[in-house]
Image: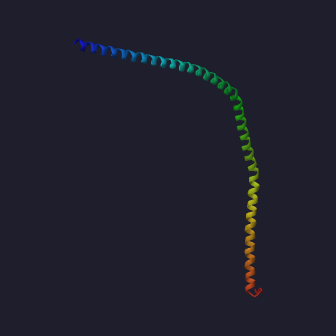
C-alpha cells in the first residue's frame, strides 16, 4: 500500500503544483488587466479634462454670439412686420381702383354684348324682309 500512497502523494503534489501554476497565471492576467484598467482610467481622466475645456469654449462662444443673434432675430422680425404692414397698406390703396376697373370692364363687356345682340337681331330682320323695313 505504501506504493499506492506514494503514487497518490505524487499525483496530489502534481495537482497542487498545477493549481499553483494556474493561480499564478490567473494572478498575472489579473495584474495585466488591472494595469490596462489603470491606463484606461488615466486616458479617461485626460479626455474628461479636454471635454471640460472644450465645453467651456463652447459656452464662451455661445454667450458671445447669443446677444448679437437675438438682436438680429429681433431686427428681422421688425423688418418682416414692417414689410407686412407696407404690403397691406399698398394692397388697400390698389384694391379699390382695381375693383372699379374690373367692374367697368364687366359693364363694358355686358353693354357691348347687348348692343351686338340687338344689332344682329335687327340686321337679321331686315335681311328676312327683303332688305326694306315695311312698318
Where is 116 relative to 28, above or below?
Answer: below
Q: Check the picture and name the quadrant holding the C terminus.
A: bottom right
- Residue drawn at x 32%, y 13% as measured from the top left: 13
Q: In terms of depth relative to the viewer, which is nearer, 41 or 101? A: 41
Instruction: Give percent across and percent down for residue 71.
Output: 72, 32
Instruction: Give percent across and percent down for residue 63.
Output: 67, 26
Residue at the farthest right position = 132
Q: In terms of depth relative to the viewer, which is nearer, 105 or 38? A: 38
Q: Check the picture and name the quadrant holding the N terminus.
A: top left
Residue at the farthest top position = 2
- Residue drawn at x 75%, y 63% as measured from the top left: 105
Q: Is residue 10 left or right of residue 36?
A: left
Q: How is the image coloured?
A: rainbow
Instruction: Give percent across and percent down for residue 90.
Output: 76, 48
- Residue drawn at x 43%, y 18% as measured from the top left: 25
Instruction: State which quadrant residue 30 falls in.
Output: top left
Q: In terms of depth relative to the viewer, which is nearer, 68 or 106? A: 68
Count of numbered labels shown in the rendering: 0
Amino acid at each position: 500500500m505504501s506504493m499506492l500512497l506514494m503514487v497518490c502523494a505524487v499525483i496530489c503534489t502534481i495537482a497542487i503544483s498545477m493549481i499553483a501554476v494556474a493561480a499564478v497565471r490567473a494572478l498575472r492576467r489579473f495584474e495585466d488587466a488591472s494595469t490596462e484598467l489603470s491606463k484606461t482610467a488615466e486616458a479617461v481622466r485626460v479626455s474628461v479634462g479636454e471635454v471640460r475645456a472644450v465645453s467651456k469654449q463652447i459656452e464662451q462662444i455661445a454667450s458671445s454670439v447669443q446677444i448679437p443673434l437675438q438682436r438680429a432675430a429681433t431686427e428681422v422680425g421688425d423688418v418682416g412686420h414692417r414689410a407686412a404692414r407696407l404690403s397691406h397698406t399698398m394692397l388697400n390703396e390698389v384694391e379699390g381702383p382695381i375693383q372699379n376697373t374690373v367692374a367697368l370692364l364687366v359693364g363694358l363687356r355686358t353693354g357691348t354684348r347687348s348692343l351686338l345682340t340687338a344689332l344682329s337681331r335687327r340686321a337679321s330682320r331686315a335681311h328676312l324682309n327683303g332688305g326694306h323695313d315695311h312698318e
